[in-house]
Image (tube, rainbow, N blue to C red):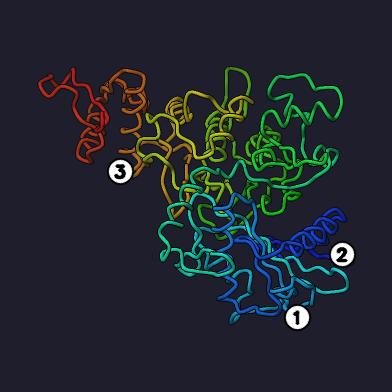
Amino acid sequence: MADLLTRRCVRCEAANRKKTPMRDVQYWASLVHELCAMPHEAGWVEFKHNNAEPQEIGEYISALANACALEGKAHAYLLWGVEDATHVLLGTSFDPFSKRIGNEELESWLLRQLTPKLGFQFIPLEVNGKRLVLLEIDCATRHPVQFAGSEFIRLGSYKKRLKDFPEKERALWRALDATPFERLPAAEKLMGDEVLRLLDYPSYFDLVGRALPDGHSAILEALAADRLIESAGGGHWNVLNVGAVLLAKQLSDFGRLQRKAVRVVVYKGKGRVETLREQMGAKGYASGFEGLVGFINNLLPVNEVIGRALRKAVPVYPELAIRELVANALIHQDLSVGGSGPMVEIFDDRMEITNPGVPLVDTSRMLDSPPRSRNERLASLMRRMGICEERGSGVDKVVFQAEFYQLPAPAFEVTGDSTRSTLFAPRTLTKMEQADRVRAVYLHACLRYVERESMTNTTLRERFGIDAKNSATASRLIKEALAAGVIRLQDLAAPPKTRRYLPHWA
């Protein structure tokens, strides 16, 4: 039985490190005994005494993560303080939290060298009076894990370069294609009461429009039927990633998933030099969605509009556009990217919503492309819960809202390994840059096309609020877009006054 345990997560700030609950102490000690009872090392388990060379650790993280994906395991383990041949507990002098490479901490150095980023955590513990260190490693998802540019794999008890074994590489890719992140466990071997303590299950039944079942057993069975949790045998349950991400009362209760929480940052001015406020979300995406949108709206500037008798405050950005973009960021993010989550950044002149992962469709075709999500289970459940629609990505709604309120056109772009959507504060046409004007004309043509209509000088004047006597202004905007190659004439023979325009790809 363990006497002492301090669990530290590779992506947690040092100030947030804390002792883990007694359940975790018992769980990790029990896991150590199970691993040591194995007759020999498996592809997803490695034993060490004191060997803690950083390069070697990084290569083992790659090899073990790839091997456990190949063998259908959720996690791999590297355990220090155990004799390799006999699995007898010896104890270790290895301390991962004091180990440094140059001026960089070991955890940070390892994470920086991994591609794609991968969740792992060092767990120091004491078992049978012996000091041990357990390294838990998430299994590879979507892509084989590289360390320092090379992929490794375990063959028996040996670590090898994956490229030297093409059959193993092909088998690994087949396994990665078959195991989505959503189906992996976020917490394992929990009692039913513990599952219900961690999940906001009443909000689940409320969101899907079902009455709350009578009794804990019926609630657990309902959650399992929707594949939010799964039975682990012996009256224990595993909470799957999709269940934790959607319904967690506190995402921090699920270790590495806490970095999937939405971060909201408000800046002073137009840059990121001075932060006025920063808040990290706590709840799961479904149970906390309404609160998140309300929190964002309360932070946004408002305009005062004078009616016939009263003044009223009108938000700078339409709430429907915010809802759609936040939902998109949650659904379409690459959940396998470690150490990163969705972010909402509010500036004086714009609001940026960023999620990890490159989009599956070209950013210029988001408005008309059929919906595609790398997280199909997550997307399906959020649609059932009314957070987003089944039929599409909602980008057409965002563009429509920008046009309805005569805002600059939203921007959709790839920045590094992330996707960013930007809403811009009100700006007159004369203060827009050429790129802004061209983007607005293009998206207007796209919106008309998906509505089975064509763009004309008249529709463009309505979009920008241009008076009919200034039709030449709309004509200049159309010429800019034609020169940029983003739109084209529908009928080359049509006279100027009846010309219609389509997106360049239509």
Q: Nearer the viewer, residue 197 or 40?
A: 40
Give the residue drawn at x 54%, y 40%.
329
Quadrant containing the C terminus in the rendered view: top left
Name the residue beneath numbered marker 1.
93
* Label 3 secondary element: helix
Give the residue drawn at x 71%, y 77%.
49
Q: Is residue 243 left or right of residue 32?
A: left
Q: CA distance from mark 1 to mark 2?
A: 17 Å
Q: Position of residue 373 (x, y in %)?
A: 49, 36
Q: Position of residue 405 (x, y in %)?
A: 47, 27
Name the residue beneath numbered marker 2.
2
Q: Is residue 26 above or below residue 318?
A: below
Quadrant containing the N terminus in the rendered view: bottom right
Q: Is residue 101 above or below residue 243?
A: below
Label whose residue precedes the other's in the sequence (1 or 2): 2
Give the residue drawn at x 89%, y 66%.
3
Query: What is the crowding at mark 2: few (fewer than 14 residues within 10 Å), some, or many (at least 20)?
Result: many
* Label 1 secondary element: loop
Q: Is residue 316 visible?
A: no
Q: Position of residue 368 (x, y in %)?
A: 37, 29
Q: Is residue 74 visible?
A: yes
Name the residue beneath numbered marker 3.
434
Label whose residue precedes the other's in the sequence (1 or 3): 1
Q: CA distance from mark 3 to mark 2?
A: 66 Å
Instruction: Identify the amino acid type marked 3.
Output: Gln
